[in-house]
Amino acid sequence: MRCAGETLWRVAGLALTVTLLSVCSAASEYEYLGWRSDVYNGGRSYGKPPQCVDIPDDLRLCHNVGYNQMLLPNLLEHETMAEVKQQASSWVPLVHKNCHPGSQVFFCSLFAPVCLERPIYPCRWLCEAVRDSCTPIMHAFGFPWPEMLTCDKFPQGDVCMAMTQPNATETTGPTGYSHVCPPCDNEMKTDALLEHMCASEFAFKTKIKEVKRENTDRKVILQKRKKVLKLGNLKKKDFKKLVLYLKNGADCPCQQLDNLSHQYLIMGRKVDKQYLLTGIHKWDKSSKEFRKVIKKLKTYKCPAFENVFK
């Protein structure tokens, strides 16, 4: 028999952080076994017994997270793989921003929990670190940190999922991403740009007429002529005189706005009564990657998902 607090599992670089609260448990309780619904007596009542299933390649948020099987239903009460894919897809653009090195681990511990004998939730400190680092980027796109991910609900002294154990010298500030305005990051990988497009409500090709500072934001005034790639819920009257805002972008660098002579791929979404700029890329036909994106746009089907951020 081994104490649970002395056990450390490694799954392709991920660690399950364990703290001993009271008594030791048998090691077999935490081995990779088929899920038995009668083992776990807490939490919600599932409509069907939880089971281990392979993480599919098209679950892009988690297909390379470091383990191959997940529990279904998951820890966010998604009972079908289709529902998991729909909901998880909305987080892919944020993970691509690399706002925290543990963001993928955190989200996947909930959307595609590792297949152990009992559910393993993310550690509260990991949730707080990811939240504190990623919230500024989410705010730039008009998203709040959602209520379903309130960190207080996750364990801080029980068996939990983490990357490494927290320590006094650890920083929780944004790590791994530049201080460029998030919508101005020039991500030209085809898959990332397509998913970013799907997360935006509208997209078009146009030129920029003028850029002004307005409080902490930047006001981006577009030329009237635009080629629509995705209209969303925009009405024609709004489309003609569209003004976008770079949220909290008054002082952060945005190279695309330094020279307004180019045409751009502009993406955005409506938040309250404002239209926010969520992505801007130079319309560069000399770029092989950009040509690939534009060609793929004609047939690409965005995943349908409910907005988990509202």
Image (tube, rainbow, N blue to C red):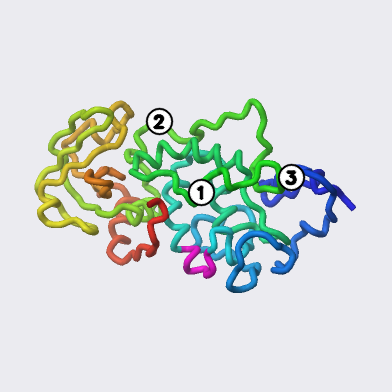
The tag on residue 54 is: none
Q: Residue 205, how many percent across, how many down?
A: 20, 50
The rendered magenta stretch, by its main secondary structure, is classed as helix
| Quarter residue 6 falls in | top right
Name the front one of labels 1 and 2.
1
Instruction: Name the residue beneath numbered marker 3.
Output: 18
Q: Residue 91, how many percent across, how many down?
A: 45, 52
Q: Could you say whether the residue bearing mark 1 is in a helix, strand or loop?
A: helix
The tag on residue 179 is: 2
Seen at 57% across and 48% down, the residue is 106
The answer to which of marks 1 and 2 sits earlier in the sequence is: 1
Seen at 63% across and 59% down, the residue is 43
Instruction: Name the residue beneath numbered marker 1.
Output: 149
| Amino acid identity at mark 1 | Leu
Seen at 21% across and 42% down, the residue is 244
Residues drawn in magenta: 78-85
The answer to which of marks 3 and 1 sits earlier in the sequence is: 3
